[in-house]
Image: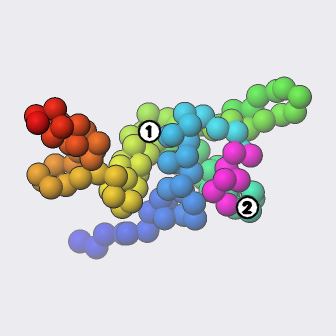
Amino acid sequence: MMTDYQSPLSNRYAVDILSLVYESEKIMATDMLRIAKNYKTVIKTADQLVDLGLMTMHLEAGRRLMKIYELTPKGKAIAKRMVECREIFYGRLDFEDGSASEKSEKKSKKRSKS
């Protein structure tokens, strides 16, 4: 059996968009400029994530019309794992005992035992 490793998450900025929306709960389309300066590219990927059912988009009227993006339950589950992967990569999780736990939690436990 041959597995297709091409994933919608491999689209440019997909992981970054999911992580940003997860950390913010909901964002305006213009907030995605924190990820990349090319607005069209970022919004194209965000709209693909909407088509895949990972995010929702609705319009809000104010002084101007705003695109608001939020994660679906499926998108939240995926984004949560993306954020965990990012924490592992940047060394914010400790794996000494074989399970992932926050370093600050381990340090506070060690101090309380002393």
User: Residue 87, percent across and down?
Assistant: 37, 53
**At x 89% / y 28%, what residue is drawn?**
63
| Among numbered discs 2 and 1, the one appearing first in the sequence | 2
Q: Quadrant of residue 41?
A: bottom right
- Element marked by disc 2: loop
User: Residue 43, percent across and down?
Assistant: 69, 53
Residue indicated by mark 1: 76
Per the rendered image, the range of residues in magenta is 30-36
- Type of residue at label 1? Lys
Give how far apart the Cα atoms at labels 2 and 1 are: 25 Å
Decide: is 111 above or below 89.
Answer: above
Is residue 72 part of the magenta span, yes or no? no
**Which label sits on residue 37?**
2
**At x 54% / y 63%, what residue is drawn?**
11
Of badges 2 and 1, the one in the foreground is 2
The residue carrying pointer 2 sits among few (fewer than 14), some (14 to 19) or many (20 or more) residues within 10 Å by Cα, namely few
- Main structural element of the magenta stretch: helix, strand or loop? helix
23 or 13: nearer the viewer: 23
**Which label sits on residue 46?**
none
- Type of residue at label 2? Lys
102 or 51: nearer the viewer: 102
Left or right of 37 on screen, residue 18: left
